[in-house]
Image (cartoon, helix red, strand yellow):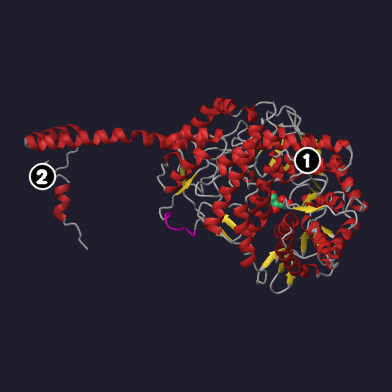
């Protein structure tokens, strides 16, 4: 290793210039420099001047990039809402400012092509207007399975792509003019009706392309890393999407998926599956595809998975465990508790009852009816509202005193009504429990926000009201409307309409036009805004509940504003969650259009539910899944309402 000599050091220290004494005065340095300059030849001086000029020009040229970078950061840092509650999300997924990115990946080209012929015109126009600032490059921190072309850590992203400051502002008027049906109060024209249906089919095809290209036969697409994630290892997205393809008339896609089910799908696997999730998505998906197509392939597969799930009910209380190993035939609760979730054990009934009807084997219906019977008789309810957990050993509610229509309880209420409808409206106990629960909601959980008086469903914890509402609760307007359609009190429909408006506001009041996972409503006088969102609640998982309810409300009222609202939501999914290379992704932040922070996951329910309900919402054909003949399970799989002789 080279060590600098003493002599080197002395020469760098201007040794000799000051006769051995160190003189660092400004005057001495100026004179010394000038003397040295004079000693240079003309050629040397010209060369130095030329280099300086060159450096100056380069500095000027790079100035905009630097300022853009800086201003991007500053905007992000300063972005807060009026109440200063909302701060920009920590850039853990997107380590570089978006505006710095200028992608030149193949996806960008293909997206541009797509935008010329696909999607609603509004979107196309926005993209075209943006021209060469189209796609944004994001780095996917979660991608540990990157493939070729992603080595640089950059992935083309068509989402928060658009430099929103410019594009959104600049196109608002255009949007109004170009898609009057979506923005005026009038009836969407027949033409736009057809176009909106086609827009859903395009969205589905785009989602399917991502699934097919990067995660075929696996559970869920990770669209940014162009890979997949496994949950049960059973092709979850493919099965969840089967009946959607059938309903949307996507025959080619349906046939290729069916071929996979026929040749690749096996349940003889040593895997733990969640009883509720596999029932609503897999058993429900197979049963509904059988109902729609009559193809016994799907019934056979449904019988197979249904029988493999039955060990879950072998518990001391007959309240099922949460997890089953479908290969070994064993079941167990989660590692940390012997409790199951109330919504999970009470939202598998439609599917197992249907399996009994089709197979004439009574054990399926008997097992789920036993759960309903026990829950009906349990202490610990409040005016028909149930706690969130139930113990699999003693069959009692646990964690009592907390009541919500959101996570862990939601579909209990939905399945009370829907089982009653499925069975031909004869099972009075189910109806009574449902009616009592809705009264319980009105009495304990319903409030109005300030300043605009939005009706919302909050939560109760040991007598304390919390104005918190999950997006999951937005299933309720649809369920209330379905009840009213089936002869339940008319005020259920009034409440459905009010809650529908609230759920829509959860979208439009966000900067991306997409709802967060959870909102809090202001209730005190003098509030300036109705809806607040906590930092941790800003994500959107492509959930279906609001478009599900819009579908019911439109079917029963024919009020076209519900279709327009749905179309706005579809446009915003396209704008902020669509990934250019295929698929859609959940996002972390619905409050910042410039920085949505994609999560790199497409949930199976986006294809199973969200796009299906959007399509049905835009359809004016009441026989496309006639609601007097079918009842949707909680994963949007239509099951037949039993004929009266059944
Ligand atoms: C779906 O799996 C079902 O709709 C379930 O009832 C609730 N969660 C998701 C969709 O948000």
Residue occupying the point 76% across, 56% down:
291
SS label for mark 1: helix
Q: Which of 191 and 435 is in front in this view?
A: 191
Q: Mark 2 points at which residue?
A: 16
Residue 7 image point, x, y percent: 13, 54
Residue 533 lies left or right of residue 119; in this view the side is right
> Looking at the image, is 263 positioned above or below residue 585?
below
Which image quarter holds the C terminus?
bottom right
Please state if 524 lies on the left or on the right of 83 as rendered. right
Residue that label 1 marks: 477
For the residue pair 241 and 11, the one nearer the viewer reads as 241
Q: How far apart are marks 1 and 2 (CA)?
A: 90 Å
Residue at (56, 33) in percent of width and height: 122
One can see residue 287 in this view: yes
State the image quarter where residue 540 is shown: top right
Residue that lies at the very extreme toward the bottom in this rendered image: 328
Give whichever of discs 1 and 2 has the lower sequence position. 2
Looking at the picture, how far across and down is residue 431, in whole percent? Answer: 90, 49
Residue at the image point whose x is 20% and y is 35% from the top? 52
Left or right of 285? Residue 400 is: right
Q: Where is residue 233 in the image (x, y as percent from the top left)?
A: 62, 64
What span is colored magenta in the figure?
A: 144-150
Mark 1 Cα-neighbour bin, 10 Å: few <14, some 14–19, many ≥20: many
Residue 477 sits inside the magenta stretch: no
């Amino acid at each position: 290793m080279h060590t600098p000599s003493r002599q080197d050091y002395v020469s760098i220290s201007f040794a000799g210039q000051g006769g051995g004494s160190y003189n660092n005065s400004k005057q001495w340095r100026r004179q010394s420099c000038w003397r040295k300059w004079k000693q240079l030849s003309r050629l040397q001086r010209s060369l130095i001047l030329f280099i300086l000029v060159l450096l100056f020009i380069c500095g000027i040229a790079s100035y905009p990039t630097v300022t853009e970078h800086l201003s991007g950061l500053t905007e992000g840092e300063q972005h807060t809402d009026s109440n200063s509650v909302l701060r920009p999300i920590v850039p853990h997924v997107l380590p570089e400012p978006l505006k710095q990115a200028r992608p030149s990946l193949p996806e960008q080209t293909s997206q541009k092509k797509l935008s010329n012929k696909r999607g609603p015109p509004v979107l196309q126009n926005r993209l075209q207007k943006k021209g060469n600032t189209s796609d944004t490059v994001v780095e996917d921190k979660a991608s540990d399975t990157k493939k070729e072309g992603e080595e640089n850590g950059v992935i083309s992203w068509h989402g928060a792509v658009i430099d929103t400051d410019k594009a959104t502002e600049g196109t608002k008027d255009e949007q109004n003019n170009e898609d009057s049906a979506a923005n005026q109060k009038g009836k969407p024209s027949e033409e736009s009706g057809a176009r909106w249906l086609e827009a859903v089919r395009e969205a589905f095809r785009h989602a399917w392309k991502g699934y097919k290209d990067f995660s075929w036969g696996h559970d869920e697409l990770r669209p940014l890393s162009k890979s997949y994630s496994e949950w049960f290892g059973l092709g979850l997205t493919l099965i969840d999407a089967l009946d959607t393809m059938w309903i949307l008339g996507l025959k080619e896609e349906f046939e290729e998926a069916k071929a996979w089910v026929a040749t690749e799908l096996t349940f003889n696997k040593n895997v733990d599956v969640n009883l509720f999730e596999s029932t609503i998505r897999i058993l429900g998906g197979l049963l509904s595809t059988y109902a729609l197509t009559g193809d016994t392939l799907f019934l056979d597969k449904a019988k197979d998975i249904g029988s493999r799930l039955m060990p879950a009910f072998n518990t001391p209380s007959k309240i099922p465990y949460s997890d089953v190993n479908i290969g070994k035939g064993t079941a167990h609760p989660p590692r940390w508790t012997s409790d199951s979730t109330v919504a999970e054990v009470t939202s598998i009934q439609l599917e197992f009852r249907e399996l009994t009807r089709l197979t004439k084997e009574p054990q399926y219906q008997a097992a789920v009816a036993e759960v309903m019977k026990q829950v009906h008789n349990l202490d610990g309810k409040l005016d028909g509202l149930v706690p969130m957990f139930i113990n699999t050993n003693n069959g009692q509610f646990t964690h009592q005193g907390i009541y919500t229509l959101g996570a862990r309880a939601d579909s209990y209420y939905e399945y009370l009504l829907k089982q009653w409808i499925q069975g031909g409206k004869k099972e009075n106990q189910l109806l009574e429990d449902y009616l009592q629960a809705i009264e319980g909601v009105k009495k304990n959980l319903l409030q109005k926000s300030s300043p605009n008086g939005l009706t919302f469903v909050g939560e109760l914890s040991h007598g304390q009201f919390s104005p918190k509402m999950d997006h999951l609760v937005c299933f309720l307007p649809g369920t209330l409307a379905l009840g009213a359609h089936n002869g339940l009190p008319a005020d259920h429909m009034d409440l459905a309409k009010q809650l529908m408006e609230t759920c829509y506001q959860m979208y439009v009041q966000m900067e991306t036009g997409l709802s967060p996972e959870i909102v809090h409503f202001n209730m005190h006088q003098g509030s300036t805004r109705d809806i607040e969102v906590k930092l941790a609640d800003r994500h959107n998982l492509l959930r279906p509940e609001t478009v599900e309810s819009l579908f019911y409300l439109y079917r029963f009222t024919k009020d076209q504003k519900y279709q327009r609202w749905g179309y706005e939501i579809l446009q915003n999914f396209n704008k902020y969650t669509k990934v250019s290379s295929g698929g859609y992704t959940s996002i972390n932040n619905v409050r910042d259009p410039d920085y949505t922070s994609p999560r790199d996951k497409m949930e199976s329910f986006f294809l199973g539910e969200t796009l299906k309900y959007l399509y049905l919402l835009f359809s004016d054909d009441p026989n496309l899944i006639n609601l007097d003949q079918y009842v949707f399970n909680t994963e949007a799989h239509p099951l037949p309402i039993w004929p009266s002789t059944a």
